[in-house]
Amino acid sequence: MIKIVILGAGNVGTHLFRVFTEAKEVEVVQWYNRSLDHIQLHRDTLAVTDQLDALMEADVYLLALSDDAIPITAKELTPLKGIVAHTAGSVSMDVLKHHTDHGVFYPLQTFSKNRAVDFKSIPICIEANSDQNRKTLKKLAEAIGENIHPINSIQRMGLHTAAVFVNNFTNHLYQVGAQICEEQEVPFGLLRPIIAETAAKIESITPKEAQTGPALRNDKTTLQKHLDQLRDPVFKNLYLTLTESIQKNDEYSKL
């Protein structure tokens, strides 16, 4: 049985609490958050605290905190016997180096508190400062998932950057599309089938093979019509930037 303490009650911390409390090989012994308001309803089933100096003994301490809060909180922690690991994609493991045993436990997924996710399919990227600590984090990951990968800090930063493009930026483009639909008084729902098909394509072909549209075809007439219709200068620049990127990428791939 691996005993863990979860620090943080944001999106990631909340999902980790839910999945680990259901795992047979894991015991969540304590949940920390700087505000008890978000976690005190669980005080009948486990220990909760808002004091870093009141953390209980555990095998692993998971810092499910914001990127900026991780190094600050890590320095405020008193020496702990267990592994201190953070859950961030863009934070180096080195910020924890003053702890004897440390590592990273990074679930590569987008999390919203009120939307369930299947941890069995989520890639969990692990890193540690020793083979033994890596084995412990791997065992912890295997208690909730099946897609485990040893990834170093540089690789993880690259993955996180890529994830921002395919997730955050893509979702922002959905927002742009929704605003354009609203301006034209057409339902955004009409775009859901094409969104679903675009996502489904990369299950069987590469993103490059899936690329279509006026930018790839260099359909200048259509490109100009789109630009003429866009009212927001930010959207115009975004359209031009993405068009240029698609065309340059296509040219590069043909070299």
Image: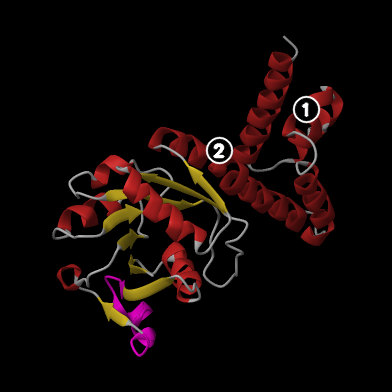
Q: Which residue is mark 1?
A: 215
Q: Amino acid at mark 1?
A: Ala
Query: Helix or strand or loop: what does disc 2 sit on?
Result: helix
Magenta stretch contains residue 42: yes
Query: Helix or strand or loop: what does disc 1 sit on?
Result: helix
**Residue displayed at 29% across by 81% down:** 47
Q: Which residue is mark 2?
A: 162
Q: Position of residue 44 (x, y in %)?
A: 35, 90
User: Magenta residues, as a range?
Assistant: 31-45
Q: Position of residue 59 (x, y in %)?
A: 29, 63
**Residue displayed at 75% across by 29% down:** 208
**Residue displayed at 59% across by 39% down:** 234
Q: Position of residue 94 (x, y in %)?
A: 27, 40
**Residue displayed at 25% across by 47% down:** 96
Q: Amino acid at mark 2?
A: Ala
Q: Nearer the viewer, residue 115 or 179?
A: 115
The answer to whether 66 is drawn above or below residue 33 in the figure is: above
Question: Badge 2: few (under 14), some or many (20 or more) residues near its Cα, within 10 Å?
Answer: few
Quarter that holds the N terminus:
bottom left
Q: Nearer the viewer, residue 242 or 12?
A: 12
Q: Position of residue 54 (x, y in %)?
A: 17, 73
In the drawing, does residue 240 fall left or right of residue 138?
A: right
Quarter that holds the C terminus:
top right
Q: Nearer the viewer, residue 191 or 123?
A: 123
The answer to whether 56 is drawn above or below residue 86 in the figure is: below
